[in-house]
Image (tube, rainbow, N blue to C red):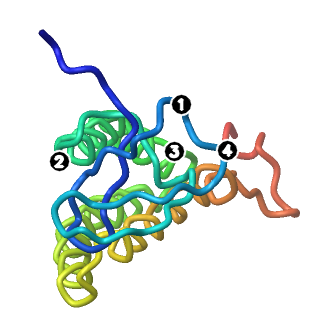
């Protein structure tokens, strides 16, 4: 028989998922005692999630997020090169070099996680990257045409 999902919390001491003991989603803080380390702690509703008490929820959500972002680079590449004119080659090389950022960010993220002993703190690194991408998507990607030039002048 398949195990039913239940509301669980992540123990702040031993980092294990622990059944919360509540039947419905709590709208106020709850007190849960960890079965492994016997620590009793208070958890906010934002720290309670629906799942089986195991460690596959977090990595699965992270992989699903990465999978959904597969289309980001081609979109950013196309928008970044839009109307660059003679600077298209330079813009393309800068965008290709931005891939190295992915190789640099992962070790920085891991280093912060190891030093702080907290993945929650380490996730501020990708959060910063996502905020930069969001800035580009909403504000930075707008084409700015100087006041003295006209769009029609490119056709001539």
Place of residue 42 in the rendered image (x, y in percent of width and height, measured from the top left): 49, 66
Name which of mark 3 and mark 4 comes first in the sequence.
Answer: 3
**Could you tell me which secondary element the residue under label 4 belongs to?**
helix
Name which of mark 1 and mark 3 comes first in the sequence.
Answer: 1
Q: Nearer the viewer, mark 4 or mark 1?
A: 1
Q: What separation in Å lies between label 1 and label 3 (alpha carbons)?
A: 45 Å
Taking the image as shown, residue 151 lies to the left or right of residue 20, namely: right
Residue beneath disc 4: 154
Residue beneath disc 3: 79
Q: What separation in Å lies between label 2 and label 3 (alpha carbons)?
A: 38 Å
Q: Nearer the viewer, mark 4 or mark 2?
A: 2
Taking the image as shown, residue 17 lies to the left or right of residue 128, namely: left
At 57% from the left edge and 48% from the top edge, which residue is drawn?
83
Residue beneath disc 1: 24
**Which image quarter holds the N terminus?**
top left
In the current view of this chain or complex, which residue is farthest to the right? 147
The answer to whether the residues at label 2 and label 3 have Cβ atoms under 8 Å apart is: no
At 25% from the left edge and 41% from the top edge, which residue is drawn?
57
- For disc 4, the neighbor class at 10 Å (few under 14, some 14 to 19, many from 20) is few
The answer to whether the residues at label 4 and label 1 have Cβ atoms under 8 Å apart is: no
């Amino acid at each position: 028989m398949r195990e039913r999902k239940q509301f669980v919390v992540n123990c702040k001491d031993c980092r294990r998922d622990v059944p919360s003991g509540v039947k419905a989603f709590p709208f106020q803080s709850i007190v849960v005692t960890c079965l492994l380390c016997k620590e009793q702690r208070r958890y906010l509703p934002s720290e309670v999630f629906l799942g089986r008490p195991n460690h596959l929820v977090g990595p699965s959500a992270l992989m699903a997020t990465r999978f959904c972002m597969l289309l980001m680079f081609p979109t950013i590449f196309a928008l970044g090169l839009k109307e660059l004119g003679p600077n298209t080659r330079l813009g393309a090389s800068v965008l290709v070099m931005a891939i190295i950022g992915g190789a640099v960010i992962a070790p920085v993220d891991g280093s912060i996680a190891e030093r702080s002993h907290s993945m929650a703190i380490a996730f501020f690194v990708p959060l910063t990257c996502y905020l930069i991408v969001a800035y580009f998507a909403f504000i930075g990607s707008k084409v700015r045409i100087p006041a003295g030039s006209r769009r029609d002048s490119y056709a001539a």
